[in-house]
Amino acid sequence: MFMKTFKTFEEKWTAWLDDQLTGKELEDFEASLPDKEAAEAEKRDATKLGALLKQELGAQPFSNEEFFNHQLRERIAREDAQDRPRRAGARSTWWTVPRLVWTGAVSLALFMICAVVVMREKTPSERSEYLTQILNMRVDPVVSPNATVSVFETQGDRVTVIWTEGLQTLPSDYAAK
Amino acid sequence: MQTETTLAQADVSELDLVKRCQAGETEAFDELVTRYRTRIFAMIYNMVHNEQDAWDLAQDSFVKAWKSIKRFRGRSSFYTWIYRIVMNVTIDWLRKKQVKGAGVEFDDAIQLREVNPASKTLPKAEPLPYERMERTEVRARIDNAITQLSPEHRAVILMKETEGMQYHEIAEALGCSIGTVMSRLFYARKKLQNLLKDVYENI
């Protein structure tokens, strides 16, 4: 059973012509028609048009039916024969689809591994000199026994925040830097 | 009940034929061609109005069907599936012909502008008594009227009125929504009612 909610006027009109509107949808649509009689006349016209098309176009004579099949059989055989070596050739080549997929996956994995290695490699030249100096101070337990140094970095924004606690002294050349 | 059983048997044997085709049996495909060739030829002929072109397009459609029958999964009926191939081949051919041709045979935009959805259909030509018309003349009038529709509108009206297909079957065959089918049917009917009123009024 055909069930659909009709949205546009065109859909409702077509459904109405084909007697597909029922219940409240039918009532609402018929109530919305400005001229019910004209609409009914249109519906009769559509029915007559449908009958005319069916009568005139429905039965199209088709001569030489058997020749049609014969010609089709020959064409299919010919095209199959042409396709067969092409398919066989495609199978014999080294670059079959599974191999291509496998090679692609391996290449991608290798690329990812290289990319990760390169990205994790540290570049000391980009490190702040202050950080090195303060860390040096941190490892001297005599000068600053309770010092802690925390470093926060945002590489994208090129910002480094050094948070120090318990430092007794700073390097002598710190202010000059 | 007996009819339902007969239909069910017909469906089963059709499915069986399709399975045999999928296994590469050309005899089974020959049987399917025999079942559908007349309807498909008529459908194409009504769209292109030339016997030789209709013959060639029907052949092209069946060859395509044979080549892709392994992909048929049976989600729709075989005839809806093959109609989809037929429609693709025919509409594509008509579109190419339109591009190659000197004049514009049909134009959706013009057609939609010409038709007022709320208008009453009035004959454009003087009414002619049907009795005086030769059958060929009627056919020529119908063919001429259909030629003024776009390929998609032709497909929809022919599948609905001559094949008696349901909206959802037409939608499946054309690869569009049911709403689009109904909208195209609306405009196609309006246009043909305008062009053929004097013909069907006198039947």
Image: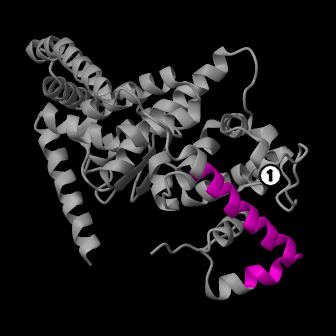
Which residue is nearer to you in this view: A79 or B191? B191
Q: Is residue A46 a member of the stretch shown in magenta?
A: yes
* Residue sitting at x 74%, y 79%: A29
Please name whichever residue, B22 or A129, is drawn nearer the observer in this view of the structure.
Answer: B22
Q: From which residue to which does the magenta span run? A: A28-54
Q: Quadrant of the N terminus of chain B?
A: bottom left
In front: A12, or A93? A12
* Residue A169 among magenta residues: no
- Tell whether B8 sits left or right of B60: left
Relative image position of residue A3 (x, y in whole percent): 51, 75
The residue pinned by badge 1 equals B197
Q: Is residue B34 left or right of residue B90?
A: left
**The furthest residue to the front:** B131
Residue B151: which quarter of the image? top right
Residue B196 place in picture, x, y as percent = 77, 47
The type of residue carrying mark 1 is Lys
Name above or below for residue B124 compared with residue A150.
above
Q: Report whether B184 appears left or right of A177.
A: right
Q: Is residue A97 above or below residue A165?
A: above
Question: Residue at coordinates 75% horizontally, 24% vertically from top-left?
Answer: B104
Give percent across and percent down for residue A34.
Answer: 89, 76
